[in-house]
Amino acid sequence: MSDLRRIARLPNMIDVSEAEIARVQNAANACLRAFDLRGYERIETPIIEETELFLRKSGGELSSKLYAFEEPGGFRTSLRPEYTAPVIRHAIESGDAGTRTCRYQYFGPVFRYAMPEHQYGAKPRQFNQLGAEMIGAPPFRADGEIIAMAVEGLNSLGVKSPTIALGHVGLLRSLMAKFELGERSGQFLLANAGRISKGSTEDVLEDAERLGLLGSGESNAAPVDADIEQIKRVIDRSLGPLGANAGSRTRDEVVARLARKQIQADSPENFKSALSMLSELTAIIGAADTCIAEGRRLASESDLDPGCFDLLENVVTAAVDEGVNPSAISIRFGLARGVAYYTGMLFDILPDPDAAESLGGGGRYDGLTRALGLDADVPALGFAYSLDAVAELVAESSSAGSSAEPMQIVPADADSWPAAATAAAGLREKGTAAVLQDVPDPKISSRVIIVTSDGKQTEQAAT
């Protein structure tokens, strides 16, 4: 007996069987062919990238899930947790970003760690993503194209009635601008839109108070007077003394406006009003025309701009124009994941309206090119499936692999090996998988052919 410790698989890593490999590859091939029809170029990016690539926009949301390490060359690197940032990096390095509309599609493994207590703690930490990115196309027609592709890929696999749960970060930001919240407070509310939609308003408010996002609501004249000199120093250091270059406003007017915004950002009244509005809005779920009409009504009653909902209506119209059934679109105003990443519409792909987990998702992220070093914000958007989850919905295809089940070619005795090898080669030339075995193995196949030295073949079942 060996004294060496047996080495097991790492937690939440899986060995994949031949049948599962075939099922996933078959699903990938069908989706990629569907995307080929729309002119999307296939691309593969490195599995290892500089860690900073994944932190510029995603920040803390993704940082805790990275498999990060320092490579021998001294670079801080990570296993690829997603494809979007690497694809944008490629478009920038190739010189295509900002000069033409780029369409890319991809398929491959990604890696994300999850703590055991996390909601995804029991899921595999390596899984396959398949998706597409479109760089250089502004709203709204491109939004419709990407949503339609997400549906078409599933249709190609026989999933005939997927649901697109559609939200819009840009719409929420426009509505919240009325409340003049600071950046931290605004980001906090958007990031918690999902919790708010589930009725956790009081919990969100308590979290905001613990984080110090709410002021006392009392007069803060003294602190503001002290802050004004600091604001002046920051302005002068960043922009130089403001005089004629300040336009129609004087330097003191600019400083006073910034000071007022600082007070307003800490106003409990403004924060609670924004929270109340989001609570009502995110409770609206369902068909696009009904939800958009309800949203406009709520905005008007709250003295907000109902025209903001044109942003979402235009996306829906573009998707329908691309062939998406209106009944397949479900509005979810509380869908606001990755608010540091997305800038416009975003969506989840569901196998049916009541599904607890999505098959993937995507959206618009117009600020990512500048975050990755380009000197301009290039319109960009995309989506990705978790292909392993998609493949689970699809029955195994009998066409996957060279045949449904390989033949086992077994020589009758030692002298029969040459004849058996010839028989196996003949089957392979005809497109049938053939495995040369010294004894039958039922785990490989139940189909066995015994070959004698004179080439005679007898088929039997493996036992």
Image (cartoon, grey):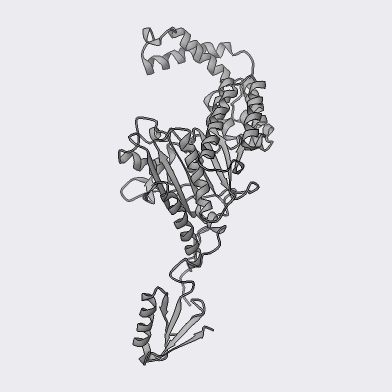
Q: Is residue 66 left or right of residue 421?
A: right
Name the image quarter holding the C terminus. Answer: bottom right
How many numbered circles are shown? Answer: 0
Q: Is residue 150 left or right of residue 39?
A: right
Residue nearest the observer in this picture, 96 or 243: 96
Question: What residue is drawn where x is 41% and y is 48%?
Answer: 105
Question: What residue is drawn where x is 52% and y is 83%?
Answer: 462
Name the spot of residue 114 as percent of width and height, x first: 53, 50
Where is 391 relative to 221, above or below? below
Name the spot of residue 231 as percent of width and height, x first: 46, 15
Residue nearest the observer in this picture, 60 or 29: 29
Name the spot of residue 212 as percent of width and height, x first: 59, 27
For the question of whether residue 259 can be seen, the reply is yes
For the question of whether residue 205 can be seen, the reply is no
- Write down the quadrant of residue 336 in the picture: top right
Question: What residue is drawn where x is 63% and y is 48%?
Answer: 356
Where is 273 relative to 197, above or below? above
Name the spot of residue 110 as percent of width and height, x first: 45, 51
Question: What residue is drawn where x is 32% and y is 38%?
Answer: 96
- Write down the quadrant of residue 171 in the picture: top right
Where is 437 relative to 5, above or below? below
Where is 170 relative to 224, above or below? below
